[in-house]
Amino acid sequence: MRLVKRAALRVLICALLLLAAPRWARAIDWLPVAPEDLAMKDNPKQPGSDAMILYRELVDDASKAGASGDSVEEYIRIKVFTQEGAKYGHVEIPFEKNYQNVTLVTGRTIKPDGTIVKFDGQVLETTAEKLNGLKVLVKSFSLPDVQPGSIIEYKYSMQGHAGWVHSQEWIVSQDMYTREARFTYIPDDAYGNNLRPMCSTYLLPSDSTLKQLPNGTYVMSVHDIAGIVQEPLMPPERPIQARVEFYYGDSEAPPATDPSDRYWNHYLKKWDAELEHFTDKKNALNQELSKTVSPTDMPEAKLRKIYAAFNRSVIWTPKITR
């Protein structure tokens, strides 16, 4: 009986250690590798490329932000064509330490002959920027034995702190060609009926399939996205990146993408009402105004009288310097 108890205790301790340890290299069910992808020598859609993204999947889940924080999971599979393209085997994941943390990093290299080399190295953490209390860190790691002809793939997860919903966006354009990518955003439903999730799109291809499901989740699939090639004296990348930005807006407001002025007219009325409520001096202002203008005055005459009364009420004393 004592041996059984000790064995059970060892099992329990091992389970607790596994739960407490970072999930840097947990078991992952990787997608199957197509033989034609492994045999590929160049990008047929963009010849001469150093590498290309074969598949990418990004899932942003803010549905439990209030209780346990929002989460981000991303999976990327890359085909390396040249020695220069082997640089993509070094991966950097930036995150804001005050609001989130990287909880999973795993990856592997598939050599040209199909041999699989799993990542079991170190994940390093360095400070990228620290300013006014904001601390941006980077988790970095290098996949093993990356060479021309290899396929590399990795996954990572980030977990936000409870009570925070981060600005969510899908950066569709990368620095290399993307053959296929899928995106999912599950919004926070804790805002009640006053706010609803919305999105704005920029430079998406005409055949992209962005849609919102009945449960509020946004999904999108894209393919054949050209990479943004760095050039001397080029403008910042962001204005030329295809992307989707998410935010929360008034449930009664028209979509921000509405071509008319209905969106801004809605918010102008809303903000004007909020300002009036905040100042709450309308009656006193009307009483003072009735002493200056007459109901029969024309609009221009009213403006002139108000302007003159304002100038009389302001005492201006020039400052004399010696």
Image: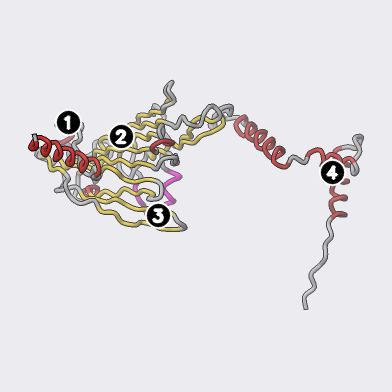
- Name which residue type carries label 4: Leu
Query: Are there few (<14), some (14-19), or many (20+) residues within 10 Å of tag 2?
Result: some
Magenta stretch: includes residue 230:
yes
Q: Is the residue under label 3 in contact with that under label 2 (CB below 8 Å)?
A: no
Secondary structure under badge 3? strand
Q: Which residue is mark 1?
A: 34
Q: Please tell me which of labels 4 and 1 falls first in the chain.
A: 1
The quadrant of the rendering that contains the N terminus is top left
Q: Which residues are magenta?
A: 229-240
Residue at horizontal 48 percent and vertical 34 percent from the top: 200
Q: Amino acid at mark 3?
A: Lys
213 vs 148, left or right, is right
Q: Position of residue 222 (x, y in %)?
A: 35, 31
Q: Which residue is mark 2?
A: 57
Kind of residue at disc 1? Ala
Label disc, if present, on residue 135 of the rendered structure: 3
Residue underneath mark 4: 303
Q: Nearer the viewer, mark 3 or mark 4?
A: 3
Q: Residue at x 17, y 31 (%)?
A: 34
Closest to the camera, between mark 4 and mark 1, is 4
- Mark 2 or mark 1, which is nearer the start of the sequence? 1
Mark sitting earlier along the chain (3/4): 3
